[in-house]
Each structure stands twice: as C-alpha cells, then as structure tokens.
Amino acid sequence: MARNFNHRIRRYTFKAMHFFGLFLAMMVLCVPGFWIVLNSFRPTVEIMAKPPVWIPNELNLDHYRAMFGGIGEGGVPVLTYFTNSLVISVTSTVIAILIGMAGGYAFARYKFKFKGGIFVGLMITRAVPGVALSLPLFIIFARVGIIDTHIGMIIAYVALNVPFTVWLIDGFFRQIPPELAEAAEIDGCTRWQAFWRVEFPVARSGIASAGIFAFLTSWNEYALASQLTRSTTSKTMPVGLLDFTSEFTLNWGGMCALAVLMIIPALILTFLVQKHLIAGLTFGGVKG
Amino acid sequence: MKTFLSGASCAVLATAAVTTIVAVTGIAQAGEFDGITIEAKLIGGQQYEALYARIPEWEAATGAKVDIISKKNHFELDKEFKSDIAARTTDWCVGSNHSSFASQYASLYTDLNGFIGKDVVDEFVQANIKAATFDGKLVMLPRAQFDVSALYYQKDLYEDAARAKAFEAKYGYPLAVPETWAQVKDQAIFFADPPNFYGTQYAGKDEAIVGRYYEMVVAEGGQLFNDDFSPAFNSDAGKRALQWFVDLYDAGAVPAGTTNYLWDDLGNGFASGTIALNLDWPGWAGFFNDPTASKVAGNVGVAPAPKGSAGIRTGWSGFHGFSVTEDCAHKEAAASLVEFLTNENSQKLESSAGPLPSRTAVWDYISEQAKDDPYRAEVLAAFKETAATAFAVPPTSLWIEATNLIYPELQAAILGDKTVDEALADAAEAVDDLMQEEGVY
Amino acid sequence: MKRLKLPPWLVLLLPAILILSAVVLIPLVLSLYSSFTSYRLTRPDSIFNWVGLFNYEKAVTDAKFWAAFGRTVLLLTVALNLEMLLGLGLALMVSKVTHGQRLLRTMMMFPMMFSPILVGFQFKFIFNDNVGLVNNALQSLGITDRAIPWLVDADLAMFSIIFAEVWTATSVFGILILAGLYAIPRDPLEAAKVDGCTSWQSFRYVTLPFLMPFIYIAMAIRSLDVARAYDIVQVMTNGGPARRTELLWTLIGRTGYVDARMGYANAMGYISIFLAIFFTVYFFKKLTKSRKELGMGA
C-alpha cells in the first residue's frame, strides 16, 4: 500500500515537473516574441517607460497606421518589401529544392570518384563567412548588372540553400530501396518516369522539410540582402527593418510592427507543413 | 520618431509645401535638361524623406527625370559607396553625403565649385561650407540637416527649493542649469539615484564616443590631432577630458550600460524620464516634447552646450548634404538638382519639421516662425548659440578608422580595465602606427 | 559533330556545382587574391599592390586577432553544446506530451521565424540596463535593486550574446532531435524494460545512441550557420565595450567595410575559414561514425 502510494507520488511529481519544465521552456521561447508583438500595439512612451508599465494602458494601431501611411508620415513601402520577400524566397526555395533533388539523387544513386570529397566540398561552401563573400559578390553582380534585382537575390539565396537541400534530400533518397525504382523500370517506365512515379512520392515529406528550412533562411536573411539590394525594386523585409532607423533615431514600435508582418506568414507556413517536417527529417537525416 | 514628424509639424509642413511650389523656378530654366535621367542614391529614413517629395517640382521645371536607385540608412549607404568605388560602378550622379564620412570618398565626388555659382555658395553658413571643402574641393552642398548637440534637461529639477538648498550646501554654489562641464558633473552626481534615476549619460561606442571625447578635448583647450594628423590627445587636456567620463561612470551617475549606448538608446533613455541632463541632437527636440512618445513632455528645457575648463563650448558638429559624382555624365543637371534640394525653399520645408538649416537666411526665417511657440523658440536659441562655435571632425580620410582604434581604449578606461594614462597612451600609439603605415607623415 | 556525353551523376550535380562556383567559389578566389594586396575599398587601384604575406603576418602577430579568435571558439563551443542539451531536453519534454503536440511543435519553432537582425535589436532592448525588460522585471519583482549592465559587464555581455544565439538556434536542435525521437523503433526500448533497465539506463544505452546522428547533423548544420550570428552580435554590442565581446566576424566586418581595409580583412577571413572547416569536418566525421555504429552506414 505504502509502496503504491510512493509510486503514485513519484509519478505525480514527475508529471508536475514535466509540466513546469515545459511551461518554462515555452515561456522563454515565446515571451521575447510576444513582447515584440505587444510592443507593436503600444505607444512608444509605454514601451520605454520607467518605472515599467506592465499592464498596457493603451493599445492601438498607430504604428501600423503610420507604417502604411505616406512618405513623411512614417510610411514605409511595406507591401513592396513583402512582395519582394515573397517572390525571392519562394522562387529561390523552389529552385534550391530542384537542384537539391538532382544533386541528392546523384549522391544517393550513383557511384563515382571523389564522392566524399565533393560532398564535403559542397557543404563547406556554406561555412564561408559572409564578409569574405559579400564584396567580391557585389563586384561580380554589379558588373553583370544584377545588383538590386530579384534575379540577383534569387541566385544568391539558391547558392545559400543548395548545400543543405542536397544533404537532406540525399539522405532521403538513400533509404528508398533502389529495387523499387528498378521494378518500375522493368514495368516499362523510363528512369525519369520511375523517379516521378515511385521515388518522388516517397521522398515528398523530406523535400518539404528541406523546403521549409530553405524558405526560412531566405525569408530572414539580412547580411547578403543588405549588400545586394538598394531600392524598393528588390529590398526585402529584413532590410526594410532598417528603414526605421536614421542617423540618431530608431523607431522600435514601428520596427515591431514590420516584424509582426514578417513573422506571421512564416508562422502560418510552419504550422501547415510541420507534420511533413518531422516526418521528412526522421527519414532524411539519419540514413545518409 | 515618426510621431514627432507627423504630429505637430504636419500642418507647418503642408503650408510650407504650398508656398514653395510658387517659387520653384528662377534657378533652373524650363526644359533645360530635357530627356536627361539623373540616378541618385539618397539617404532613407522618415526624417529625411519629406524633402524628396519636392523632386517632381524640379523635374517639371527642368524636364529631367530623377531615378532614385538606392535608399538606405547612413551606415548602409557608406558601405554601398565604398563597394561602388571598389567595383567602379560610380556612373550614377547624385549621392547623399555626410561631413564625417565625406573625406573618405575623395575620388568619388566632383568639385561643385565649377557648377554652383559663388553667390549661391555664399548664402550658406560659411563654417559648413568650410567643413564640406577638402583640399579646396567643395564636395557637397549642405541640406537642412545640420547637427550639433545642446543640453536637454528636466526643468522641474531646478524648481524645487529644498533640493536647491541641499545642493548649494554641498557644492557651495547655487543650483542652476549648468554652464560648464564641471557643473554638469557635480549636478549629475547630485541628481543620480540608481537604478531609477541618473544624472546624465553619454554615447559609449563607435564614432559616437570618440566624437563626444573629441569635443570635450577641445573644450578643455586641447586638440585631438596635430596639424600633421599625428595624435595630440595624449595631453593634459586629453586626460582631463577622459577623466570626466571616467568619474561619472565610477560615481554611478550614468547608466551602467552607457558604454554600449548609441544615439537611439540615449534618446529613448531621456524620453523615459530617467535622465536629468542629456547632451543630444536637435532631431530629438520634437520627440522629447511629444506626450505619446516621451514621459518628460512638457518638462523639457534646452540650454546651449556647456563649456569646458578652457572656456570653450563643446560643439562637435556634422551635417548631411548632396554630392555629384566625378563619373556623372550630366554634371550640370546633377548640380542643378543638388542646388534645388538645398535651396532656400527646400531648407525651409525641411527645417519646419525640426532639423536645423545650413543657410543663414533660413536660420532667421525659422527663428521668426517659432516666435509663438516658446518651446521651439528655446530649442532654436540654444542650438543657434551652440552652432555659432561648432566645429567639424578633423579633415582626414582616416577619421573613421582612427575612431575605431580610439574608442575601445576610451571604453577600457571608463570601465576600469585601464587607467586613463594607459588608455590614452595605447590609443595614441595605435593611431600613430596607422598614420605612419598610411604614409600621412 | 559528336555530342559530348557526360556521366549522369555529373549532369545531375552540374546545377549545384555551377551555382556554387558562381556565387561562392569565384568570389572566394577574388578575395583570396585580394588578401595578398593592400586593397582598400576607397582606393580601388590598391588591389594591384601586391604585398605578399604582409596581411597574414600582421593578423597572426596581432594579439587582438587571437583574442577574437579564442572568443569565437569559446562562443561556438559553449553555444553549440548548450543548444544541443537544451534542444534535447525540449524535444524529450515535447515528445512526452499527449495532447496539443502540433501547437507545441509550432511554438517550439517560434524563434526560427525571427530574422537574426531582428533578434539583435530585440535582445538589445531586452537587456538594456536602464529601461530593458529583464532589469525591469527583476526590479519589479524585488530580486535586485541594481541596474545590471547586461551588455557591458565582462562576463554578462558574453552571456547575453550567447543567450540570444541559443534562443534563436535551440529550436533547430529541438526539432531535429524530436524527429529522431519519433523514429526510434519500439522494440529495443521494450526489450530494455523487460530486462529491468531503469528509465535512465534505457535512455542512456538505447535512446541516446539512436539520437546521436540527429544531434551531429544538427551540430554540423549549426556550425555551418553560426556565422549568421554576426547580425545579432553586431547589433547588440558590435564587439564592445573595450573589445570584451569582439568576435572574428565583428572584427573582420569592421576592418573590411568601416575601415575599408578589405585586403587585411580577407586575410583574417581566410584564417577563420579554417575554423569553420574544422568544426564542419569534425561533426561530419562524428556523424559518419555514429551512423556506422547503428548499422546505417552508406
């Protein structure tokens, strides 16, 4: 009886600790973010108040209204930035996925010389510090004439994401038995058809997970974008954040408002595909 | 910061815009530059963009078109200009410039003296023209974004008789708005009540703290550089200047994080009502007095920058302007645009929202306009007084690089990692090495 | 004319190789060359001024460079390990939840939605000593009556930067490890239970070895990515005060762009690339090894 009781106590403490730990972790992860969301609705005088105002006296849409307002009234071309971000991120993600599928398939299905070396070589391109890259890239892009264009940004982001997509998709193809595709080929499919009919559907969630990582990277990238964009023709939202700074001032409330517009689409997308994400990573990651 | 732009000043802005339309022409002849497109790289940010709304007027008057190919904040723009010089993609025409950065772009911009009439140049504040001239080349025309710092303070601190008495008993002179930096130090230590209230604060990193130190060295009767740009700050005046920063930090009279503050932290700090005295830029004047942005609204006083022990006011100043590139294919048209953006009506429009002008006539004009607004009048009077003795940064292309060597040493002294003597000796040696390596002397 | 026939693997790899050469390799060759010159951005002709190993000698003999180097290694080691441990804990806790996992997983990934530059501003304000969220909370709760200088104090400044970095990246570990947890086959765990293992034992000897490949993948991905923390550090402290948080990236960025000494900056950059390569290859080797142990070798 006593033992049973002890056991129960232990189980309850464990449960309570689990709940508490989870709660604490989620707090730490989410509070800084919620703080940004909250700030976007508060007048500046309350954000920076001392003594602090914990319970907002006033919530309003002033920062949003100003952001969508005209030039000279605090307006920032948000919609243009949003479109730029969307076009650049989506296109570069799709291209990076296609290239990643081709490359991943090559690594998974063919034997060739220097395979390991080429693979690590591809990965290491990602490890190059941005500073060593940004100026020569700028010079090349400026000479070719693709500075401040969507194309230029897309090319840069595809390169940024390709190592990762190749890796993840390679691991995924590997765990699909080659016999599956071979069987389809025997049934009269070309290799191309076999790929799309047999291997691709199985690999889909792996590809989705590579996609969400690539998308988030492009969506949030700042360092390269600040170098390769100039005007509203290609500026993305992270670069647009700096519109709220001038030489001496920084409009934190306004920045938060733009940040909220950046976070929401990413959040919705993640929520929608996160089931695939988990499934994709499960296979793609390990069995490389 | 948009709040102070949009709020009270909106009405003024609108009326100014209306009056300017009438008076556009006169400088440029109609159709003079038909079919020409001028590519421009302009500073972005809410404070700066109201002026660009005037560009269509210039286009209509001259027949040229303006294509703004880049709009960024100053530090990003600096990076872009340097990248452009490196990539030799400098065939665009008009660029925003800043007096502190201008010396670095020697090869980029052309001498405006050949394109702008001397009578026009004479209408600007001559100290600004001098600071925009390098080796006899006038590289930029100043817009109405002149910056020098005056002392903002909380008025009610000086209205409490008990406090005034306690102060006089302790320091032996009556409590009044400070006129010297020694008084600022006394009062800052007296007012401080950390962590809820601080006497003052200062910019603590990058070019900002070196600028603050530079003006303090001058106010103490010293120099930052000798005439050959060898370091001169490792002197008695230089040590006194740095000691001022160190003493305030040690006394807890400034926020403990001040060595990580830049301008935005300082402005937000004063607006939060936790800082008694704040040496700051004119761009904040409206913000500090705006009840939706600042807790000290209605309680802000502004005095001219205090003086150092040599009887000289601090007055590190800078300004924005526009330049024309050497590689521009249509320099006349570009210069005409620059002249237009800095002409009297443009400056009236810009300074109606708060920033300070760089034309003598516009100074008079805005003082006249502010007659019925006591706060604005006080602000202008304080800044006008400070501007009269203001000085620019040393005219060397290595200024920014030198500040990057000096500021970590200043921070080390303030935080107690080094003594004042050690820090200044190390900084002077580093700057000396730099100047020699670059063959300055 | 006979068409050149490329092996199929090369055709498939060609797009990846082409784009990486164009965007990474060629610029790298350019910057490697410039590291042997006295290249200054504001004097473009200086790119032809060959100075041999001068920049490298200058970097190698500069105490400031090695201090930044050491600090970067420290940051990488501490941050990556912390992210791994916290990510592991987070994943374990989330995997034990029966209801609302989908929501929890999304919440767990919340920090990944934040652009690094935004994270920098966010934590600069949160850790502000005067009006920041952390100090306000501590003072309101009566825990301290001081204004703690989070971004200035020698130890706390590094802590704050590491906190911000860990905050952004723990999610990546969490989600990868969570994926690993879902993939663990049930049988070995059941067997361990039957054999009378405690839950710690079955975690240590069954679950953890299985998770190791996931952990190394996350490590490798992060060590590739961690240079993106530049945005965060640059906004939060820019290496200061008094060089207390100077990292390779802030040092190189300032030298290259603000001081315009691109040649010298690139030399330092090349020395630091070896650091990145070391971390990547190290984790890659570990990954291959732990896969082999699990019998999943390619």
Image: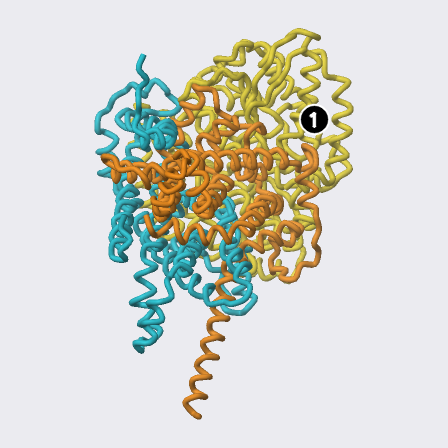
Rendered image quadrant of residue A199: top left
Please identify the residue farthest to the bottom as the structure is shown: A1
- For the residue pair B200 and C262, the one nearer the viewer reads as C262
> Which quadrant is the N terminus of chain A positioned in?
bottom left
| Residue at (68, 21) in percent of width and height | B344
User: In the rendering, what colour is chain A?
Assistant: orange
Label 1: chain letter:
B
Q: Identify the amino acid type marked 1.
A: Lys
Seen in the image, is C30 located left or right of residue C109? left
Rendered image quadrant of residue C184: bottom left
| Residue at (34, 40) in percent of width and height | A127
Q: Provide residue B207's location: percent of width, then percent of height.
A: 45, 37
Mark 1 Cα within 10 Å, few/some/many (few <14, many 20+)?
A: many
- For the residue pair C61 and C286, the one nearer the viewer reads as C286
The chain letter corresponding to cyan is: C
User: In the rendering, what colour is chain B?
Assistant: yellow
Residue B236 visible in this rendered orientation of the protein: no
Colour logic = by chain
- For the residue pair A277 and C270, the one nearer the viewer reads as A277
Q: Which residue is mark 1?
A: B348
Seen in the image, is C74 located left or right of residue A67? left
Residue B8 visible in this rendered orientation of the protein: yes
Q: Provide residue B104's location: percent of width, then percent of height.
A: 43, 24
Q: Where A113 falls versus B395 (above or below)?
A: below
| Residue at (43, 84) in percent of width and height | A7
| Residue at (50, 44) in percent of width and height | C115
